[in-house]
Image (spheres, rainbow, N blue to C red):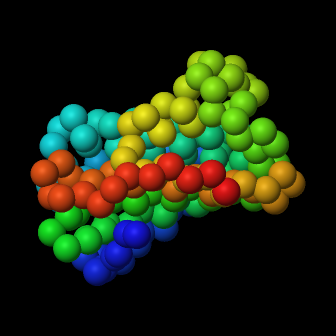
Amino acid sequence: MTLTSDPAAPTSLPIGSDADLAWVRHQVRRLADELGFGLVQQTKLVTAASELARNTLIHGGGGQAEITPLADGPARGLRLAFADTGPGIHDIELAMTDGYTTGNGLGLGLSGARRLMDEFAIDTRPGEGTVVTVTAWVTGTGAPDARTVFG
């Protein structure tokens, strides 16, 4: 279980345009740097955030990103949640398959984000929307056990 001792309040950002995607990436990079993530970890976080924010915009019709700094004892991390009220994901297993896409992309967004992060969860309901939540922990801070959850 991940406990937050609220090192900082969550930041909620709208996702409704390409400019919003750039702002999400910027905020993730800034917070990751402040929390002590190394350059490689920052790049992974920003890449995952970019993919998931783009999915929120393109496939979900827009939505929200919530960025939450975490603390669990000495461990520090960053949780990113991307929520939309779009059509939802009808087949999660298929959507998580490398190369599968319903658009013009490479089909690596969800599966790529899962590989880049320590924790990954999807909560989706066809016709009601999707929430994808990922968490990364600063290397060397005693991160809790990683989990993947499908809702």
Q: Residue at x 28, y 80 (%)?
A: 5
Q: Residue at x 20, y 73 (%)?
A: 73
Identity of the residue furthest to the bottom in this view: 5
Q: Nearer the viewer, residue 18 or 108?
A: 108
Answer yes or no: is residue 132 visible. yes
Answer yes or no: is residue 46 visible. no
Q: Is residue 26 left or right of residue 139?
A: right
Image x and y of residue 116, in percent: 39, 37
Q: Nearer the viewer, residue 19 or 29?
A: 29
Q: Nearer the viewer, residue 75 or 85?
A: 75
Q: Is residue 122 left or right of residue 4?
A: right
Q: Nearer the viewer, residue 85 or 124?
A: 124
Q: Residue at x 15, y 69 (%)?
A: 74
Quarter holding residue 89: top right
Up-down relation of residue 7 to residue 121 (above or below)? below
Image x and y of residue 24, in percent: 44, 51
Up-down relation of residue 140 to residue 77 (above or below)? above
Up-down relation of residue 130 to residue 51 (above or below)? below
Image x and y of residue 61, in percent: 73, 48
Q: For the C terminus, which image quadrant?
A: bottom right
Q: Residue at x 62, y 19 (%)?
A: 99
Q: For the N terminus, which image quadrant?
A: bottom left
Image x and y of residue 113, in percent: 47, 38
